[in-house]
Amino acid sequence: MRFIVCENYDEMSARAADILASQLILKPDSILGLATGTTPIGTYDKLVEMNKAGKIDFSAVKTFNLDEYYPIKADNDQSYRYFMNKYLFDRVNIDKANTHVPNGEAADPDVEGKAYDKMLAEAGGVDVQILGIGRNGHIAFNEPDSYLIAGTHKTALTEDTIEANSRLFNDISEVPHYALTMGMASIMSAKMIVLLANGKGKHDAIAKLLDEKITPDCPASFLKLHPNVVIICDKEAYEG
Ligand code: PGA
């Protein structure tokens, strides 16, 4: 696990975008694992700039997102499909048919989870996975628990996550209580993982990546078992 500690959010976003850009230059038909949340927005902005400047090309890229609220309609402006279209897919030359987000309208979440993992495996697996981290140490919506789940599945959001995400809704009562999320095995099967974190609120979670313990109380701690993880964070997240 390597750490790149940046001065601020802008530098963190630039470093992450540079890594993704190198990946696309080396392998134009890369499979990218993408994340929502406020953390990766700056990275997506920089990728859009590079795409507009002709430095990177998304025409052969496939993407798989980590998670989606459940149930939710794709055109709901709180859905992660809506977020991805707004911040990235509508702004670059990607074929939308090559972009995948778990289906928040699926009738049966178990069937959807299995189908999503199958589609990802058949595509060849994720080359580079972008991850955020919850202040409680969650990755995607794999929340702290006494055990973790391997594949894509439906999960209940913790009170802490509902509270953290409520800043993006008119009222906390509007925050969905469930989500579809890639599981730990789906995430850990990526060839490379780039985890982003900024701000003091993420310090406790980042501190748990710096110690030796691996525990389902902090799902992100399992990343210590992965051979190719880069944590890009700002000073506030690193130092507290
Ligand atoms: P954030 O969310 O980027 O909005 O902080 C990260 C996460 O909860 O994984």
Image: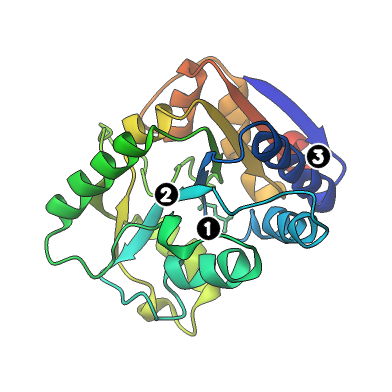
Circle 1: residue type:
Thr
- Residue 147's label in the rendered image is none
The residue indicated by pointer 3 is 235
The residue indicated by pointer 1 is 36
The residue at the point 40 percent across, 33 percent down is 125
Position of residue 199 measured from the top left corner of the image (x, y, whole percent): 72, 50
| Separation of marks 3 and 2 at Cα, in angstroms | 26 Å
Does residue 16 appear in the picture of this structure? yes
Does residue 240 appear in the picture of this structure? no
In this rendering, would 223 be left or right of 41?
A: left
The residue at the point 45 percent across, 75 percent down is 78
Residue closer to the observer: 138 or 54:
54
Element assignment for label 1: loop
**Farthest residue toward the right?**
7
Circle 3: residue type:
Lys
| Separation of marks 1 and 3 at Cα, in angstroms | 22 Å
The residue indicated by pointer 2 is 66
Task: For ligand 1, tell me if the residue under mark 1 lies within 8 Å.
Answer: yes
Image quarter of residue 216? top left
The answer to whether residue 152 is above or below residue 26 is below
In this rendering, would 82 be left or right of 238?
A: left
Whether residues under marks 2 and 1 lie with C-beta atoms below 8 angstroms apart, the answer is yes
Q: Quadrant of the N terminus?
A: top right
In this rendering, would 233 be left or right of 84?
A: right
Q: Earlier in the sequence, mark 2 or mark 1?
A: 1
